[in-house]
Amino acid sequence: MKKYAPVWVLVVLLFTALSCQTPTYFRSLTNSTAVPTAAIFQQAPQENNVNPPSAAAQNGMPGGVNDLSGLYERVSPGVVSIQVLTSDSGGQGSGFVYDNSGYIITNEHVVEGAQEVYVNFSSGLKVHGNVVAEDPDSDLAVIKVEVNSADLAPVILGDSDQVKVGQTVVAIGNPYGLSGTMTEGIVSAKGRTLDSLRLSNTGNPYSSGDIIQTDASINPGNSGGPLLNLAGEVIGINRAIRTSGTSISGDPVNTGIGFAIPINIVKKVVPVLIQEGHYDYPYLGVTAREELILPEIEALDLPRTTGAYIVDVAAGGPADRAGLRSGKTRTSISGLLAGGDLIIAVDQHPVNVFGDLLGYLLSHKSPGDTITITIIRDGQQQDVEVTLDKRE
């Protein structure tokens, strides 16, 4: 068989997060750059869902879902710009009001290393903020501000499971320090994966899953701001962009590909962050191929073209204890080893690509839960029960 150069996009299922912050730093995302969207200078039960969308918003009447200026007027009071001072520099990003207690949600990379945090409201109010919890796994952070409840306009959280590819979305944030900027686009894809900001004890990053891809214009400084549906509900938190390099001035060149944390992950994680200060993510302990190309499938002699192929199993982890296997036999493709398990379902939910497995576990499972993974091994289908650990 003809030899092919390896085409590896390894994604570590040691689990979940990336960024959206104005340079000067970049984060690698396969063959491109995911730019933190937060700028460098210069440069408990949720209370926020108590006010459902108005009848006009639900029915698409003037001032409702088809009226972008009306949407902006309703939502922008709940969107904030965030300025951060660190020991050696500073940055800026975006965020939104989570509830009437003064909690603000943003990206973890926006406030990472912050010594001072300033929160600016669209009304002109400017206050100090206190970072109460950070979650590098999903790139989330919670800020607390001490203001009168009358000065707070909590946003409405939507349901990211209901998001459809092709639906119109808008982003509101603080790109390049231009606070209150609104842009429009569509949902380009669902179920993407990004590297987490947190490393496992092997030195590899965990993975974030169920990421929403959008072509709504997102730039440095948009990090932490809301991605909204046309009912004005937050369906994601803008986190990263893919770039094609930098301009003459050193600014990242946006390719029209942006990524947002799904709001259902936020709804699951943030109440625990507020109450306990941290969130434990499920840990399976495998490294899997996101998607195989046809020559690789043929070299592995797999009976089907979909599934998550296991290339490594963490020693002593849940998958290892359950007997899941990685490849050991050399193939005609350099670096590609045959004999590993091909995951095709989890708890009877189909797994066509690795992101399907990752998204299911992050959204529906917790450490200590037992799951049933359906694999193909040596051409035979079988079920394997795995009890999940937590990330360490």
Image (spheres, grey):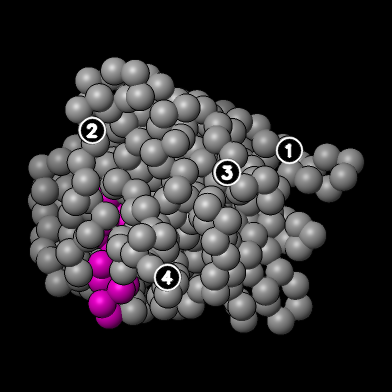
Q: CA distance from mark 1 to mark 3?
A: 21 Å
The tag on residue 147 is: 4
Q: CA distance from mark 1 to mark 4?
A: 38 Å
Q: Determine whether, in the image, residue 284 is placed left or right of residue 37.
A: left
On-image quarter of the C terminus: bottom left
Above or below, 73 against 387 in this view is above
Give the mark nearer the N terminus: 1 vs 4. 4
- Residue at point 63% right, 69% down? 84
Residue 121 picture location, percent across and down: 52, 56
Amino acid at pointer 2: Ser
Amino acid at pointer 4: Val
Give the mark nearer the N terminus: 1 vs 3. 3
In the image, which residues are magenta?
264-276
Identify the image quadrant of residue 43. Answer: bottom right
Identify the image quadrant of residue 86. Answer: bottom right
Whether residue 362 can be seen here: no
> Which residue is label 3 attached to?
180
Residue 321 picture location, percent across and down: 20, 72
Give the mark nearer the N terminus: 1 vs 2. 2
> Which residue is label 2 attached to?
54
Q: Nearer the viewer, mark 4 or mark 3?
A: 4
Where disc 4 sits, the SS reads loop
Main SS of residues in magenta = helix
Q: Are marks 4 and 3 in contact (CB under 8 Å)?
A: no
Q: Front-most of 84 and 340?
A: 84
